[in-house]
């Protein structure tokens, strides 16, 4: 997860209003309350909203106060003040949609006054402003574990179509930008020496999709000093990823309970998975969605992907040529159909070349003549 490092990575990658608030206190007009004191709050923001004010309102509620859920939807042009890592009294669920987020790093040095409680976080179709002076302040220091790891209580984290926008009151000179980039590299090196581990012991779903400027070091930042003992689904689609992450090749080391990886709609050209040496069998397959990438060939040892811990690939809509070299892929897909009929649809790879087999499903092509030649 590693939120702060992720924000900075994306922020550095992209470097090369109306009056009034949607709300007036009290907030209970926008929240449904049950007998246990749970607060289910749904806000439609026309102008602006301040999460800190909402947090103060929660602090003043009389007991009992149960779980708090906050769902924010913004009209176009509306913005919210939302400081990371979104801590508030008993806040368990937070959803943000179509918002411009400001003051994102405003509390990065603030002492934690609320225990981690957030279980489900979803930010979609939003833009996060990160002011350059604050970025410079962050990279000039070592952040704390609480800031770097965020809330380790999360069970689901979804950031979909979220962009980051560095902003500054004064225009940055070329020299200032260069100096900040150099400071950031120093910051990354310093962060490698910290002794703590981020333990996302409850996280089972992690999604970061629709980030056109996803930094090439993103996966390193996600996995260095971070532990994901229960992660089952990792979604990284539509990020223009070119290189297949080595962490997925060695997924058992980094994500021991992983069951699904979604890398669809990227620019991946090659992939490989390490075959385990141990003789232990894992009958639950790992699903790899590589649909709509730029893959032209498959690994030579793809026949071993169904041994020990099965790996089921979705390679549809890739420019793989159905020549003699595609015979091993055809054998693999037919084996998947026999052993895992539930995933039959994933094996229906349609050839686009050569012209003799255009629009033919690969599983129906006979490659015996290739072996005879």
Image: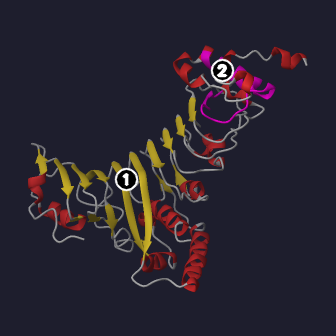
The residue beneath circle 1 is 125
Q: In this view, does 80 lie to the left or right of 180?
A: left
Q: Distance between the residues labelled 2 and 1?
A: 38 Å
Q: Quadrant of residue 363?
A: top right
**What residue sits 57% from the left and 60% below the top?**
215
Q: Is residue 258 visible?
A: no
| Start-end of magenta stretch | 308-337
The residue beneath circle 2 is 360
Residue 156 against residue 322 in the figure, above or below = below
Residue 111 percent coordinates (x, y): 34, 72
Task: Assign a secondary structure to mark 2.
Answer: loop
| Sequence-first tag of 2 and 1 | 1
Q: In this view, does 369 lie to the left or right of 221?
A: right
Question: Could you say which is closer to the camera, residue 302 or residue 258?
Answer: 302
Quarter in which the C terminus is drawn: top right
Q: In which quarter of the image is residue 75?
A: bottom left
**What residue sits 42% from the left and 66% below the top?**
147
Q: Residues within 10 Å of mark 2 (few under 14, many from 20)?
A: some
Per the rendering, the mark at residue 230 is none
């Amino acid at each position: 997860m590693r939120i702060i490092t992720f924000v900075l990575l994306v922020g550095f990658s992209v470097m090369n209003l109306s009056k009034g608030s949607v709300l007036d206190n009290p907030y209970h007009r926008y929240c449904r309350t049950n007998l246990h004191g749970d607060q289910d709050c749904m806000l439609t923001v026309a102008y602006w909203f301040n999460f800190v004010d909402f947090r103060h309102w929660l602090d003043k509620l009389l007991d009992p106060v149960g779980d708090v859920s906050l769902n924010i939807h913004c009209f176009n042009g509306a913005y919210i003040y939302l400081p990371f890592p979104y801590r508030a009294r008993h806040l368990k669920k937070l959803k943000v949609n179509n918002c411009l987020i400001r003051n994102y790093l405003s509390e990065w040095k603030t002492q934690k006054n609320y225990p981690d409680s957030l279980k489900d976080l979803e930010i979609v179709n939003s833009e996060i402003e990160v002011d350059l002076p604050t970025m410079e302040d962050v990279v000039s220091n070592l952040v704390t574990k609480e800031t770097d790891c965020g809330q380790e209580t999360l069970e689901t984290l979804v950031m979909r179509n979220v962009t980051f926008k560095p902003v500054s009151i004064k225009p940055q000179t070329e020299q200032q930008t260069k100096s900040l980039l150099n400071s950031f590299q120093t910051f990354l090196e310093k962060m490698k020496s910290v002794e703590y581990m981020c333990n996302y012991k409850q996280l089972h779903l992690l999604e970061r999709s629709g980030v056109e400027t996803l930094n090439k070091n993103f996966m390193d930042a996600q996995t260095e000093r971070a532990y994901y003992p229960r992660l089952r689904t990792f979604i990284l689609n539509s990020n223009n990823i070119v290189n297949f992450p080595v962490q997925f090749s060695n997924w058992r080391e980094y994500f021991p309970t992983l069951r699904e990886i979604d890398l669809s709609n990227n620019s991946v050209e090659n992939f490989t998975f390490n075959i385990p040496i141990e003789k232990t069998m894992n009958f639950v397959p790992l699903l790899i969605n590589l649909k709509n990438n730029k893959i032209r060939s498959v690994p030579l040892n793809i026949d071993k992907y169904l041994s020990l811990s099965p790996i089921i690939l979705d390679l549809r809509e890739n420019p793989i040529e159905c020549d003699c070299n595609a015979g091993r892929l055809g054998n693999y897909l037919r084996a998947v159909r026999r052993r895992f009929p539930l995933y039959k649809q994933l094996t229906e790879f349609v050839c686009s070349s050569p012209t003799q087999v255009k629009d033919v499903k690969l599983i129906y092509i006979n490659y015996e003549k290739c072996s005879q030649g």
